[in-house]
Image (cartoon, rainbow, N blue to C red):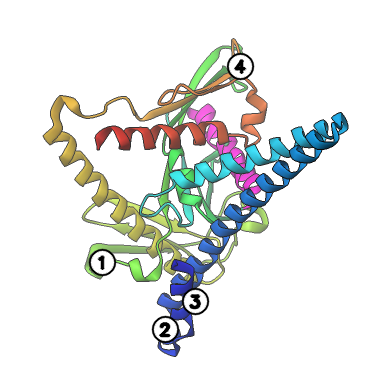
Amino acid sequence: MRLETIEAALVDPSVWSDQAKSTALMREQKDVQRILGMYESLVTQYEELEMLCEMALEEEDDSMEAEFVEGLATLDKTLKKARLEALLSGEYDKQNAILSIHAGSGGLDANDWAEMLYRMYLRWGERRGFKVEILDYLKDDTAGLKSATIRYSGPNAYGFLKSEKGVHRIVRISPFDSSGRRHTSFAAIDVIPELDDEEAIDINPVDLRIDTFRSGGAGGQHVNTTDSAVRIVHLPTGVVVQCQNERSQIKNRATAMKMLMAKLIVLKEQEHKEKIEDIQGDFSQISWGSQIRSYVFHPYQLVKDHRTGAENGQLQNVMDGDIDLFIDAYLIGEKSDDTDEI
């Protein structure tokens, strides 16, 4: 049993001399215990329902029906959660996630849209019980934001949020247009896993340009205003990362380096995937385009995911962080695609 193997390893004094290894083992131990707890909860709920059903039949007591229906609904909810977690089998699915928002084309509307998405993703993280930290926030001088970066700490954060990567489109009556015309704006979402220390890759210092600057923007209590913000540019690829949430320049630099490493690994995997698709030719999937989702505020209200077809007409609920419908549909579709390829 994996839990027994982990616990045996943690007893070994030599493991504790390697901080990265011991931290990874403790994280895995907690994850396995959580999964076992979910399984035990399923078994317990099922056995209690079975017992309740037998009692109701023996005593011919209809008053137990309401309790049985309620218990069945709880069991169904737990089972759905367990099924979704079973879909998270990717290499980095269990890792923390770093989500970045970038305003696209559309001027003030695009900046405002980026801030609306920023709020939506903060609310989603709070609803799901993740620890949410604002790593970077670049406010636009007039309205909204130009870019922002959020870290989600907790089990399977990347596995859930990876579905959000892509271009998000909004259609609405612009609050910045005195003529009341309908506008279409875009914002791009990028999601990367936060890597463990032992997964770090070697980066030649010569390939980096590191700038420090004074942080700014409407980060409130979450973003400091000391001259400690760090921006790192990987010159060979042009990848840029920055962090400004800590007062320590050293800590901001360490966080930015982890973000850079994760982006470079994701970039390498993407290049490998594109090579495979080139070999496959016409058989490659082209349905998962960059514009993944549309949020229509006018002339009707609807949020639609163009990859899965999932829809939700409760627009305000979605903007308040209720996006699990789209995440779940993506995970189910992704697993179906993987099965088809086998």
Which of the numbered marks, if any, corresponds to residue 7? 3
Q: Is residue 167 above or below residue 137?
A: above
Inter-mark Cα distance, 2 to 1: 27 Å
The extreme front residue here reads 58
Please name the residue shown 70% across and 35% down the image: 73
Label 4: element kind: loop
Amino acid type at image mark 4? Gln
Q: Is residue 318 above or below residue 38?
A: above
Please name the residue shown 59% across and 13% down the image: 298
Amino acid type at image mark 3? Glu
Label 2: element kind: helix
Amino acid type at image mark 2? Val
First in sequence: mark 2 vs mark 1:
2
Q: Which residues are magenta?
A: 107-129
What crowding class fits label 2: few (fewer than 14 Cα within 10 Å), some (14-19), or many (20 or more)?
some
First in sequence: mark 4 vs mark 1:
1
Instruction: Residue under label 4, please give it.
Output: 301
Instruction: Residue under label 1, please give it.
Output: 203
What crowding class fits label 4: few (fewer than 14 Cα within 10 Å), some (14-19), or many (20 or more)?
some
- Residue 291 image point, x, y percent: 39, 27
Which of the numbered marks, if any, corresponds to residue 15? 2
**Which one is in front, 232 or 97?**
97
Inter-mark Cα distance, 4 to 1: 47 Å
Inter-mark Cα distance, 1 to 3: 34 Å
